[in-house]
Image (cartoon, grey):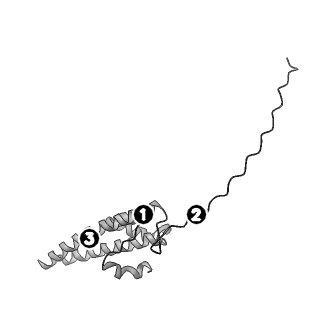
Amino acid sequence: MSDMTPPPVPPVPPMPPMPPMAPPMAPPMMDGRPGPASDTSKILAGIGYIVPIIALIAVLIDPYKDEKFVKFHAVQALGLALVLIVSGIVSAVPVLGWIISFVAWIAWVVFAILGMINALQAKYYEVPVLYGFVKSYIGE
């Protein structure tokens, strides 16, 4: 029984080479503007309209501060937040201030929801009047 040797093992064929990795895709262009680089960009841009601190963080953190889509929506969201803060200050004036503040709150809700929906759908949305003020900060 000790004379029995196991049969020789056939050599294993070499593994085929791995296909080359595809280069990272550039964000799609929309109306001549770059789209979001990822789903995280869309979510960050959309949530920034409702929670302004998220928009501020998006403008400051490194991977997103140079992304045009996120910067576009974040700067507009910060502009809307500024309008909300100013309307809070104006509300200290009786009657006329209350009316202006109420209209500003309604406008904020409408434009924040529109901005959020468009950002989550990877679309650009220019908030009327406000876009004219913030476009220099966006880089357009």
Query: In the rendered view, would you say 133 is above or below 41?
Result: below
Q: Is residue 118 visible?
A: yes
Q: Amino acid at mark 1?
A: Lys
Task: Say what secondary structure mark 2 lies in.
Answer: loop
Residue 107: x percent and y percent? 24, 72
**Does the rendering let one see residue 92?**
no
Q: Secondary structure at mark 1?
A: helix
* Numbered circle sitting on residue 79: none
At label 3, which amino acid type do we have?
Answer: Trp
Q: Which residue, as the protein is rendered here, is positioned at the far right?
A: 3
Q: Identify the image quadrant of residue 139.
A: bottom left
Residue under pointer 3: 108
Which residue is painted at 39% across and 80% down in the image? 135
In the rendering, at what x and y percent does residue 103 appear? 19, 74
Outermost top residue: 1
Tell me the distance, in whole angstroms, between the alpha carbons under discs 3 and 1: 20 Å
Residue at 42 percent across and 78 percent down: it is 138
The alpha-carbon separation of the residues under discs 1 and 2 comes to 18 Å
Q: CA distance from mark 2 to mark 3?
A: 37 Å
- Considering only vertical position in the picture, is 16 above or below 116? above
Q: In terms of sequence position, does the residue under pointer 1 or pointer 2 come before the other?
A: 2
Mark 3–mark 1 CB contact (< 8 Å): no
Residue 24 is tagged as: 2
Residue underneath mark 1: 42
Nearest the eye: 69 or 62: 69
User: Which structural element holds mark 3?
Assistant: helix
How many residues crowd mark 1 within 10 Å: few (<14), some (14–19), many (20+)? many
- Residue in the picture at 43% in, 72% down: 71
- Seen in the image, is 59 located left or right of residue 19? left
Q: Earlier in the sequence, mark 3 or mark 1?
A: 1
